[in-house]
Amino acid sequence: MQLYTKYPLKIHNSLGGKKEEFKPIKEGYVGMYVCGPTVYSNVHLGNCRTFMSFDMMFRYFKHLGYKVRYVRNITDVGHLENDSDDGEDKIAKKAKLEQIEPMEVVQRYTVDFHNIIEKFNILPPSIEPTATGHIVEQIEIIKQIIEKGFAYVTNGSVYFDVQKFNEKYEYGKLSGRRLEDMMANTRELTAQSEKRNPHDFALWKKAGDQHIMRWPSPWGDGFPGWHIECTVMSTKYLGKTFDIHGGGMDLKFPHHECEIAQAEAGYGKAPVNYWIHTNMLTLNGKKMSKSIGNNVFPHEIFSGANELLSKAYAPAVVRFFMMQAHYSSILDLSDDALQASEKGYYRLMDAMSALEKLETGPESDFDVQVWRQNCYDAMSDDFNTPILIAHLFDAVKHINQIKEGNETITVSDLIVLTNTIEAFVFDVLGIAHASQSKEDSNDLDGVLNLLIKLRNEARENKDFETSDKIRDELISLGIQLKDGKDGTTFSLK
């Protein structure tokens, strides 16, 4: 029996705004699409939080025994500056500024994206399609939408007719907006506008003479609108209706709302059963913004080369910090929060390292089966990682008590405890082990062992001033020495 039958999963569905029991279209299989990055700049930390959250969900589905097809796209054309239909294509604009080809921009920042998410131990998706690789399919669905009367051609561009669509379907059902209210609060169109009404959006944009990224179409040379790519790529690889579509909260409107409208107009059916949205990441209590200097990139956190944090933090520590908040809640990044997470991370790693050395007894003082059920209950309640982590630290407390000889555990319970905690920490939360998270761990071990040797020699020579100085200096660096019958060991705090 697969775990998903024993631990049914509930998901907060943005479409309807409530928790629902997850029932896949095909039993045992999950189709999930997540909006990926627009590759015109270095990936920012807020995006990383979104991809980390869906990586955790991907991992938990697989842990439960589902076969998962996870599709996450790369937007390499069509995303305009203000996320609507005005301004330049972000990638083309960057190419002009740097005087390079647009695909050089795409390649540079796609490589950066992959490098960063690999450091965060984010698994690659099953399929990672690009917008430019699906121009033909985008043109085909636009033709279908025009034929069904939900789009119109103006001067070489194609626009989706929101008002016409709303006569048969419901535009705004995901975000909870009513078209009538939106229209009442919108200024009239200027005389230069090609749209019939302000809420119409581009399916295809005519390329001007200076536009670098362009493709031939039935309406002339141009490029696709931002929203159409996701409708095409998600349904191509997951079917006209699939299980889960995810992305950041900021994409709910207009991007995801437009995706729904395009699919219903083109295919005549709702494309997604469960919509999941992650919340934003703030920095020191404020929105992240380059313009006000309140911004930090992942590589700056890993290296410590920034003015907002006091030190460098390992990717595994940052991921552990991210997992301590529910994906749907706002999370504030700060130096104090990262320091607290770092201490908790190493406390968890130390306890897990101690598991294989624990002595067993005839009975258990810790009810491992109840604890295990609590862990699954937390994760199956809309992927509640903070509650799961609270249960993990409950286990840490018992592990330390057993290690000190104050509690006992049976062999069978120790096996269940070890397998469960490793599965949730490493496989589900995706937290790398301390030794895996530090590229220089071997060098660190060598230096610390040398210092321990020097300290022991000083103690043997009754040079307690030197031995105490070595110990105190290491403590100030967050390294705790432990003297025992088997010698001196160290732990990172």
Image: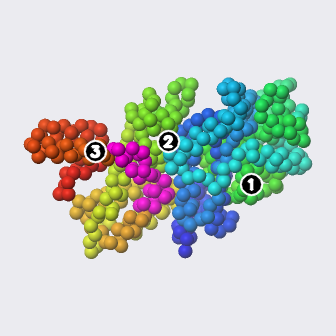
Q: Where is residue 194 in the image (x, y as percent from the top left)?
A: 85, 31
Residue 46, quarter of picture = top right
Q: Is the C-beta separation of discs 1 and 3 under 8 Å?
A: no
Where is mark 3, residue-wise? Answer: 448
Within-10-Å neighbours for mark 1: few <14, some 14–19, many 20+ = some
Q: Which mark is residue 235?
A: 1
Residue 62, quarter of picture = bottom right
> Which residue is at a point 28% across and 58% down the rendered structure image?
400
Nearer the observer, 344 or 382: 344
Residue 372 in view in this figure: yes
> Which residue is at a point 35% across and 70% down the rendered structure image?
413
Looking at the image, tell me whether mark 2 or mark 1 is earlier in sequence order: 1
Q: Please name the colour scheme applied to the rendered image.
A: rainbow
Residue segment shown in magenta = 421-444
> Which residue is at a point 72% across and 56% down the rendered structure image?
237
Specify whether residue 436 is painted magenta. yes
> Which residue is at a point 58% across and 35% down the rendered structure image?
42
What secondary structure is found at the residue carrying circle 2?
strand
Q: Looking at the picture, which amino acid does disc 1 mark?
A: Thr
What secondary structure is found at the residue carrying circle 3?
helix
Looking at the image, tell me whether mark 1 or mark 3 is earlier in sequence order: 1
- Disc 2 to disc 3, how far (Cα)? 35 Å
Specify whether residue 334 is painted magenta. no
